[in-house]
Image (spheres, coloured by chain):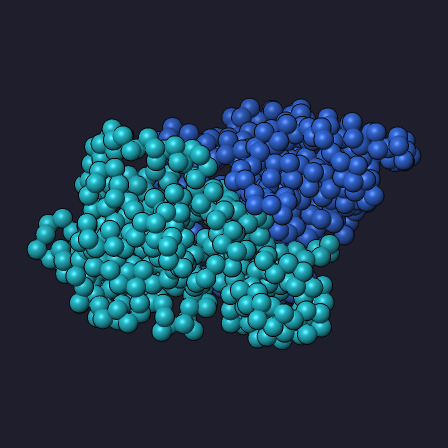
Chain colours: A blue, B cyan
Amino acid sequence: MTAGDSIALQEVGEHPLGYRVVDLMLGGGRCHFLPNTTASSCRADSRDVTKLAQEKYGWTYINSRAEFDDLKSGKNVKLPLLGLFSDTDIPFELDRRNMNDIYPSLDEMARTALAALEAATKDSDKGFFLMIEGSRIDHAGHGNDPAAQVHEVLAYDRAFQSVVDFLDNSDTEGALVATSDHETGGLAVARQLHASYPQYLWYPEVLANASHSAEYLSRALRAHIEKTNESGKKLRHFVENKLVEEGLGVMDATDEEIELVISNPALSAYAFAEIISRRAQIGWSTHGHSAVDVNIYGYAAEALRGNHENIEVGGFLRDYLNVDVDAITSKLNSTSRASSEVSLLAAGMGDQALFGHYEERLQKNLPQ
Amino acid sequence: MTAGDSIALQEVGEHPLGYRVVDLMLGGGRCHFLPNTTASSCRADSRDVTKLAQEKYGWTYINSRAEFDDLKSGKNVKLPLLGLFSDTDIPFELDRRNMNDIYPSLDEMARTALAALEAATKDSDKGFFLMIEGSRIDHAGHGNDPAAQVHEVLAYDRAFQSVVDFLDNSDTEGALVATSDHETGGLAVARQLHASYPQYLWYPEVLANASHSAEYLSRALRAHIEKTNESGKKLRHFVENKLVEEGLGVMDATDEEIELVISNPALSAYAFAEIISRRAQIGWSTHGHSAVDVNIYGYAAEALRGNHENIEVGGFLRDYLNVDVDAITSKLNSTSRASSEVSLLAAGMGDQALFGHYEERLQKNLPQ
């Protein structure tokens, strides 16, 4: 069982304490919820977590845009609600915006969740806690793809604004805290391309010209090769015209750049990303995480204004929500299953291995 | 007249409004104050600004460590005081700490200035404003030298702490605001050295092992070549043993790296910096400036806590000090000399040209 498989089980209630703790989940990652006897599963075992969720823990399960639309922006939600709209990741916003009939946006999911949770807690004095993750900002960083990344950030920003609007319009007191657990890619908005001393500028219009993410174009390349078996001049023509010019919006790719794309289709996403990064003059230092300070953005969360240690974010939320984290931690530590989870992490399923999976998925060309 | 020459004149009082506005200046850059008839001058003209300062504007002028020590940490200061302790830049802290008998530290200068200005304003209700610049953090960024940079930051941090201590111990109300006008180098604390997926780490101990800055070692290399006229195996031996191993603390430099140092002595600082950056796994994207958000650190400056537009820093100081910036701006704009200053900037002496000068100085091997 992979960490992702284990997380899917825990999310629906199958965890050391044995009861459901979440009321609503919307997003991707469906393959971890489906048994490995089905084609779109990525589980290592044959458990059907969607079935377990519904039968043992009482979840309402939906898995399509049509069913999401039936939620009527949160006015028609029966909790607990599990909505999984993609087998793996929901596509980057740069690509998703042209597949809006398949995948809901982060902002739509955020607004739906807020409305549903507000209605469900209107007679409660406990309120609710909602975690909204712009999870693929990180993936765009891993891929060193600045066009994908800026659209992920803007999509997150729209969800952020919806939360601000919600707080402004709600009768109930609330707070918004937005931050990141790390930076990815070593992004630098400045890149010296030549030995001569650089101009101080970058080119955002290059990012605006892109119609697709490097990840999308890499998948398109591999699908095209598989379908047509093209190579040589014909394939170069396809890559240059359909992928680089139409997809990336780059009209001056060099022969070497096109060759790099073709030479390793499995890692062509990196080559596409480099083509656009160079022209935007965006620098990257790694496909992994970096140690730079990350910002905190808040609303009605004055205590977190300024520079803070990361544990202070959790501390603020714990105090604001008045929850006893120590009690639940010691309860979890005392369960027999806790130690096996720890072993799982120690065996290499920790953060780094998890995040490394993006590169693996990128190369394996897993279905969306 | 270069921008630096013009700034030197303005600093002592020779500016459009025609009177002295600064009471104390300590630092480097002496060559801009000396006439081009002297060996250590870098002025384009023959004006002796140190003489002008003393004779026309009443400055006390000192230019040595001994004279600085005579200030008795600020207890023996006669204002206005101009102290210039280096012809060009004061060496990077990484090098300066071994030349403490020549150059005072940033912290020493800060404490001296605070004590002198506090004493001078003890009967005034206007107080004072002190600008302390850790100016060579930027240079280390331009040079992509992480060992030099971390020591510059630590030196600035010591001065910062001295200001905090001063505010804690002073009877007079005060505020501390620390920020930067930009980042330099596109520093990333994470660097992927190989195609394989990176570990999430970096090696601070590599920086701790360095005894000298890349700038210092580059100067040492050029001085050695000039003195000995060595080349080939003998020069490689010197570079490897004396500069890379003893100076940088790097024991495993490759032949290619040593060759790169030797192949272009004028730009060898970049090669030294790259040797140490790779081993510390620190990434850089440019020798110029980047557009990343910079932090604000304050003390008794609550209004600046959190994320702010850069103009809000100036706005806070203007309001805190209760100075009429608009009045002085319109006064400056109405002087006939103002337009010639603007022309000077428009003619390419603006920020970018100024900062580009660090690279030029680095290559020209100007005396310290």
Q: Is residue A158 above or below residue B53?
A: above
Say whether residue A349 is left or right of residue A262: left
- Residue A309 relative to residue A28: left or right: left
Percent across and percent down for residue A299 are 38, 39
As drawn, B250 above or below B13 = below
Tell me the residue at 64%/39% (across/down).
A277
**Residue A107 in sight in this render:** yes
> Residue lying furthest left in this view?
B123
Q: Please state which of residues A145 and A199 is positioned toward the viewer in this rendering.
A: A199
Q: Is residue A202 left or right of residue A41?
A: left
Task: Name the residue nearer the viewer: A264 or B317.
Answer: B317
Image quadrant where residue B282 sits: bottom right
- Quarter of the image with the C terminus of chain B is bottom left
Image location of residue B127, percent across then percent down: 16, 51
Residue at (52, 47) in percent of width and height? B288
Residue at coordinates 33% horizontally, 46% vertically from top-left?
B7
Whole-percent x, y for residue B321 in the image: 20, 44
